[in-house]
Image (tube, helix red, strand yellow):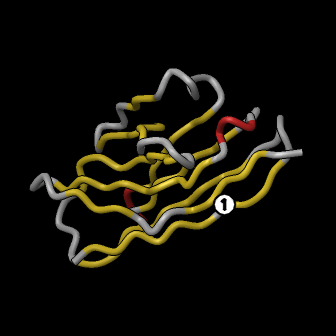
Amino acid sequence: QVQLVESGGGLVQPGGSLRLSCAASGRIFRINTMGWYRQAPGKQRELVATVTSGDTTNYADSVRGRFTVSRDNAKNTVYLQMNSLKPEDTAVYYCYLRTGGNYNYWGQGAQVTVSS
């Protein structure tokens, strides 16, 4: 089994920054993709950013240029640096992992609130 533990959420003012971290543990043989999704109240879960084992990144248009996803393969950890935050970025952010065998795992979610 694989566990994902997120940290770094919280309350920030518009224009501020936050950094999310997600550490994976358990029976992990090979990780393909890691990344982040988010879900705002009343909305569907949506992609924020992902990074493959080859360091190819993918971003939602709404966050490109403001958010940066990165990973530390030695630590099985993925990060999301969020800058220039807007109220519409408010959501629960979920860490995501896909193994080489195409199994998907999710973290428990981290609340990010952008408000003055």
| Mark 1 element type | loop
Farthest residue toward the right? 116
Which quadrant of the structure image shows residue 106?
A: bottom left
Residue sitting at x 56%, y 24%: 62
Residue sitting at x 46%, y 54%: 78
Q: Nearer the viewer, residue 87 or 56?
A: 87
Q: For this view, does 107 lie left or right of residue 90?
A: left
Farthest residue toward the left? 101
Q: Nearer the viewer, residue 22 or 60?
A: 60
Residue sitting at x 76%, y 44%: 17
Query: Given the image, on which type of amino acid does mark 1 rest?
Result: Gly
Image quadrant for the N terminus?
bottom left
The percent position of residue 52, horizontal first and vertical second, equals 31, 40
Q: Nearer the viewer, residue 113 or 26?
A: 113
The percent position of residue 85, horizontal first and vertical second, equals 74, 37
Q: For this view, does 7 lie left or right of residue 48?
A: right
Q: Which residue position holds label 1?
A: 9
Q: Nearer the viewer, residue 53 or 26?
A: 26
The percent position of residue 61, horizontal first and vertical second, equals 51, 21
Farthest residue toward the front? 42
Residue sitting at x 66%, y 54%: 112
Q: Is disc 1 surrounded by few (<14), some (14 to 19) or many (20+) residues within 10 Å?
A: some
The percent position of residue 56, horizontal first and vertical second, equals 35, 31
Q: For this view, does 61 lie left or right of residue 112?
A: left
Image quadrant for the C terminus?
top right
Counting every numbered tag in the picture gives: 1
